[in-house]
Image (cartoon, rainbow, N blue to C red):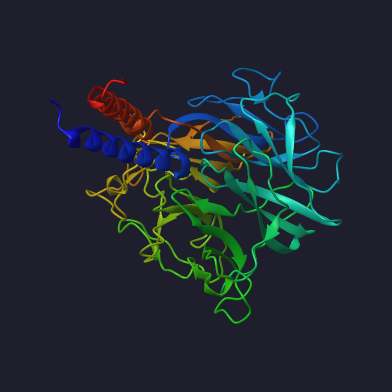
Amino acid sequence: MIPRSVDRVAIAVAMGFLTAGGILLGGGTASATFPGANDAIAFASSCGNTEAIYSVPNGTVDAVCPGSGSPQYTQSTSGSIDSMPFFSSDGGRLYFSSSRAAFGAPFSIYSVAYPSTPSSSVITLATPPSNDNDYAPTVTADSIGGSVLDFLQCVGTSNCTLQEETLSTAGAPTEAPQQISTTGSCPAPVGPLSSADGQANRPEFNPTNPNQLVYVGESPSAAPDPGQENIYLLTINATPSSTSCVDLSNTPTIIPASETYTAISTFADQGPDWSPDGTQIVFDSNRTGGDKLYEIDPASDTGAYQVWGGVNSSDQPLDTGEEVEPVYAPSDSPQGAYPKAAYPTGGSGSNPTYQPILLWVFTGGGTNVQDVDGGQMINNPTLMATFVTADYALNVNPIWQPLTLGSPLPEAPYPALLVGVGMVALAGGLFLRRRRAPLPA
């Protein structure tokens, strides 16, 4: 004889599993974020008569424009001028700024499914009002509900605002762009040096906190050093009046103890990029003379640490030129892990600092993309940077494509497993209830 309570318990448990699984399947966010495997490297290049987006496989060394040697860049877009590429968090879509119509036409924001070719169909995401230009797109991590696009809108090279709009899971806009109504106590973003090439400092979301946006603005007239370009951390809240902003450039420079640099009084911090775990920001600055790379931890905000330093075994400086536009790799380990604990701040001499993989633009002898494949970048006698591109074209705005890593079981199918278990339990409970029911007369 089956106790009457058994079927009730089975059905109750089944409904609990079904409810939990349904909530997780319907209301959660996707696990895709900017960390992942290091895949292709995309950048803007002036190969030919126009500027377009090109790409090379990760690990490529000394690539050149198509038709001028080997290995060659692969052309991914074709507009009058295409610039400022940025990948979606799953690496499947490429965003960029372009004057598609003709040279001198206003810049708008577009996207294309990646990998792409010059003939691939693009989606128009934002078109500026008359006399304005839209520059430097960036997006939040994709989720079940889509993502958020942010970009700069400027009149010429000044009077810029931060704009944003929501995108569907297919990457199409679901609303017209809206201006972020306030930057708190911080100034408006700065525009590009030229309105003719589509290049500007990218406003960039924290990949683990979509409410945090880092951007470059001009310090106000009341600041100790008015007019210099600083990096600001904007925390966007639902109530505009509670939106807060912090000047991350208002910190001392931390130099390795074995090095000697003289800080200059007026400097510009530009090109900020978040680490994949959302804990550090790398940027370029001329704060010690010449453009070099620096890292800062925005949570502690105790100082900017110079990435390069020291000399090699031939007493040649490891940083042999000017470095700008740095970006982190999605991963610097085969597992795709990015633990902050692996990258302690500071260190020199017998206590060197391990740095993650970086990609940047090297200026001098042409403008080319460089990277370094990890290691101890401070006082390391053997580590040197590798040229990704190696010609005299203008190669700028590099970005790494993240290749989303598969989640181990049971993490990925967990909500589905809950539903499956619930269905089995429900079927068992109904079967037991049917066994107890009296037969019809």
Q: Is residue 204 above or below residue 87?
A: below
Residue 150, horizontal then vertical, whole percent: 63, 52
The residue at the point 52 percent across, 36 percent down is 370
Query: Is residue 394 in sight in this rendering?
Result: yes
Quadrant of residue 180 within the rendered picture: bottom right
Quick one: 34 or 333, which is closer to the camera?
34
Query: Is residue 192 in sight in this rendering?
Result: no
Image quarter of the C terminus: top left
Quadrant of residue 75 within the rendered picture: top right
Is residue 233 found left or right of 297 in the rendered image? Answer: right
Residue 274, horizontal then vertical, whole percent: 47, 50
Q: Residue furthest bottom?
A: 222
Image quarter of the N terminus: top left
The residue at the point 57 percent across, 30 percent down is 92
Residue 15, horizontal then vertical, whole percent: 33, 38
The residue at the point 73 percent across, 52 percent down is 176
